[in-house]
Image (spheres, helix red, strand yellow):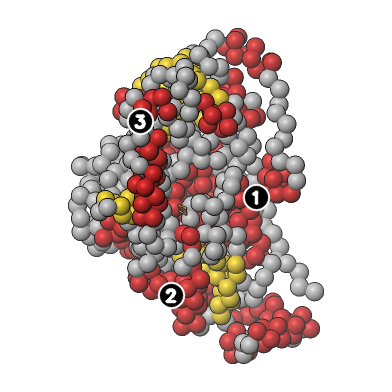
Amino acid sequence: MPKRPEDLRSHRWLGTPTLRSFGHRSRLLQIGYDREDFAGKPVIAIVNTWSDMNPCHVHLRARADEVKRGVWQAGGFPLEVPAMSLSENMMKPTTMLYRNFLAMETEELIRSQPVDGAVLLGGCDKTTPGLLMGAISAGVPAIFVPAGTMLRGNWRGEVLGSGTDAWKYWDEKRAGAISEDDWHEIEGGIARSFGTCMTMGTAATMMSMAEALGFTLPGASSIPAPDSAHARMATASGRRIVEMVWEDLTPNKLVTRGSLDNAIVTHAGLGGSTNALIHLVAIARRAGIPLSIDRFDEISRRVPVIADVRPSGRLLMEDFFYAGGLRAFLNRLASQLDLTCITVSGQTLGEGIAGAAVHHPQTIRTVEDPVYPPGGTVVLRGNLAPDGAVMKPSAAEPRLLQHRGPALAFESYDEMAAAVEREDLDVTRDHVLVLKNAGPLGGPGMPEWGMLPIPLKLVRQGVRDMVRISDARMSGTSYGACILHVAPEAYVGGPLAFVRTGDIIEIDVPNRRLHLDVPDDEVARRRAAWTVPPRRATRGYGVLFAEHVTQANDGCDFDVLGPGPELAEPEIH
Ligand code: FES
């Protein structure tokens, strides 16, 4: 049964004959609105992560206006609410430190104000999970407007991809293969428009997974940011959120075991970012659904990578859109999906992708002729990672997937960064680089340091990949035989803390094994001599983060932000 105006949450703020309602209404009139603008209408918060500091989101100011147009068209009352913008590019030490901050802010912005429904504007890496986590916890109907990816990069007619080609040409520059002038030209060509990174990095991965979870209109996540279809999608989302409020289509109806699996199938088929494992576990947890990272491994074993997008493939998100986008991609994987899951459109996922055709078969391939066979994302376990570690074999040199070699261990990023530039570093292509203290607490915030640079000496010898192990994350645009998210992290006394240079490490991807070949009694001796490092943060949010963040396999959410207990609506006195 649809809601009535007096059932709206905002009615308590705006519709009652009380002194407080008088105050709220008079302040809306102060802005210049008439009573006709809001009386009896759903109040729609447009949670906007626009910022001049975030080049991926500079168009979201315009998109907010386009969303408003749709809200007005459908008989709602739109109000824009700014939220923290997590600029992957600018924020240090890492946006991951602030994902939970955005999630908390989103939740509290909605809960504390007269909001009946929310439109979430974001896309740059951590903004997608941060917004979704907050909206799920807030519990009001919410629709996600993905920021969309930027246009392809260009350098002298060559297509450039965000991140991926930056790392590639940086190594070419280190090896002396390109000049300083070349490098500056690349700088001007690699990011040609507003929008997020256009490789299959964390942004494109998470926007696509948000669509598979049911949080966007069909096809929304693949539209390039500068395409006029993107503006129309924003307006349509504004119209739709008003209907969602009347229908009471809340996030807990979207996030189910089935839709979480659909998101994981999407991740596997895209060859998505390893960051997504952390984020989806956190999203599921907000919805009260336990999700293990092992589910990614299970589904990846049966779903091949069929999107030919870098870094696992050759092309970019703009090509993916022209090939038919996520609807066509999901159609190709329909047999793997739970098509009955409901989406923000009010239709099922199956209805949303029905009839979607692939226009470029080389870009969106088939299960029978994939870009990479099943197993594009794996979860490794062993005495070095009892709670799991993550790897993306599709972006690594195959020779490294079964490997045994001596560790070259570093206690900190700075120590590692200085060492890899040394000509006299005692390292071979068979070494395993190990970085400690880069996890949720050690980083802090688990920075994207996991693609450790290949030592300069080896770069000059032509080496472009080697095994690297850390408790850090890696940008989704990165590549290489990088084993990430080792849990528990070194900083809390996980086994990684006890690795020493020269120890033999075995990696066996087919058998999902990560092993430190050191006798148990020797590891125990090292553990006994280990002392807990001093806390890194000394004030403010950093202390809050350190006291409450969970490990990577638990989603790095705060322990106090799990599901329930249900919070009472705020008192209005
Ligand atoms: Fe924003 Fe890559 S820097 S998505």
Q: Is residue 31 above or below residue 205?
A: below
Residue 196, position in %: x, y? 43, 57
Q: Which residue type carries mark 1?
A: Leu
Q: Name the residue tied to disc 1.
A: 561
- Which residue appears at 73% of the width and 31% of the height? 534
Q: Name the residue tied to disc 3.
A: 464
Location of residue 138 by image quarter:
bottom right
- For marks 2 and 1, give the one nearer the viewer: 2
Q: Secondary structure at mark 2?
A: helix
Q: Which residue type carries mark 2?
A: Thr
Q: Is residue 464 above or below residue 133?
A: above
- Which residue appears at 55% of the width and 70% of the height? 46
Alpha carbon separation for disc pair 3 and 2: 45 Å
- For marks 3 and 2, give the one nearer the viewer: 3
Q: Are marks 3 and 2 in contact (CB under 8 Å)?
A: no
State the residue in front, 32 or 237. 32
N-terminal-most mark, 3 or 2: 2
Location of residue 193 by image quarter:
bottom left
State the residue in front, 559 or 147. 147
| Residue 54 visible in the shown view | yes
Alpha carbon separation for disc pair 3 and 1: 41 Å
- Which residue appears at 70% of the width and 77% of the height? 13
Q: Name the residue tied to disc 2.
A: 235
